[in-house]
Image (tube, helix red, strand yellow):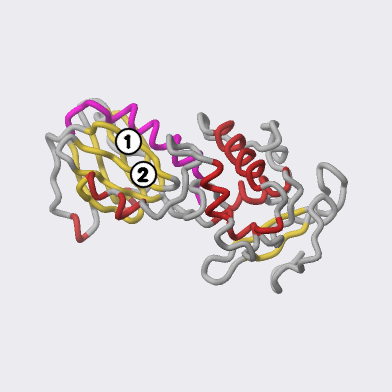
Amino acid sequence: MPEGDTVWLTAHRLDQALRGRPLTTFDLRVPSMALADRRGDTITEVLSRGKHLLARLDSGLTLHSHLKMDGSWRITRSAAGPRGRPPFQIRALLGNAEWLAAGYRVHELRLVHTVDEHLLVGHLGPDLLGSDWNPEKARERLLREPERPIGEALLDQRNLAGIGNMYKAEILFVERVNPWAPTGAVADLSTMTTTAYRLLRANRDHPEQSTTGLTGRGQEHWVYGRGGQPCRRCGSPIRSAEQGTPPQQRITYWCPTCQPTAEAPTPGGLS
């Protein structure tokens, strides 16, 4: 699933291609919006809010989309047309005289009044890559459920927006916190949220994601995707298990030596 830094970069590139130019193409290929036509409107900005994308128009409307697990936006020259993936995957086309943005398998397409954006994203916590980022508010939201495992709490976008499964595992490893530790038992949540900001900010401006500072294949992450491999700190085998309740469960990764706890992982998927 694309994480907050990937969504931020997508919004930035869409903004560069579409901002300030009248739309000559506006095609939403979902039944409920098939007749929507905003050609002639001008996009004033494209921005991310957590994992949501908001394209604002000068007509006072906003086009909302979400990448979910498999969505993406691809930009090509208008004259070339969309390329790179099968046309039947296209859910949205936005274009001007120079650039064309194709939304492949994008989800939750909605056209709303800009003043009503809060109905779509108002539930989100402080955005790690947004102008509203506030680590203290994020800490307060995390502590609303002190008994909840910290690995689940970090993924809840109502607490802080932008963390996905990869960053969750990496943040917890860097801070030496077990994913099943109760949130209220974490010694310094403020430091943890600062680490989250630092890692996402470091990867915001490019598609490659590295939490170790290395970019070589297989060297990018501390524990994520490395079940059974030796810990880069201590050499212990990295463990993995499902965490969370269906359908929200995810495979998480941790080092039992660097991230010890008396809490046992939930049954199923342990390695």
Extreme residue toward the right, this view: 235
Badge number at residue 163: none
Q: CA distance from mark 2 to mark 1?
A: 7 Å
Q: Is residue 94 magenta?
A: no
Badge number at residue 46: 1
- Is residue 92 depicted above or below 197 in this figure? below
The one of 186 and 86 positioned closer to us in this rendering:
186
Q: Label 2: which residue?
A: 53
Q: Position of residue 39 (x, y in %)?
A: 13, 38
SS state under label 2? strand
Pick the quarter of the image with the C terminus.
Answer: bottom right
Q: Are marks 2 and 1 in contact (CB under 8 Å)?
A: yes
Identity of the amino acid at label 1? Val
Q: Position of residue 66 (x, y in %)?
A: 38, 51
Q: Main secondary structure of the magenta part?
A: helix
Residue at 37%, 41% in the rendered image: 73
Residue at 51%, 29% in the rendered image: 205
The one of 105 and 12 positioned closer to us in this rendering:
12
- Is residue 11 depicted above or below 236 in this figure? above
Magenta region, residue range: 1-23
SS state under label 1? strand
Q: Position of residue 103 (x, y in %)?
A: 33, 45
Image position of 224 (left or right of 260): left
Residue at 29%, 53% in the rendered image: 109
The one of 77 and 152 positioned closer to us in this rendering:
152
Identity of the amino acid at label 2? Leu
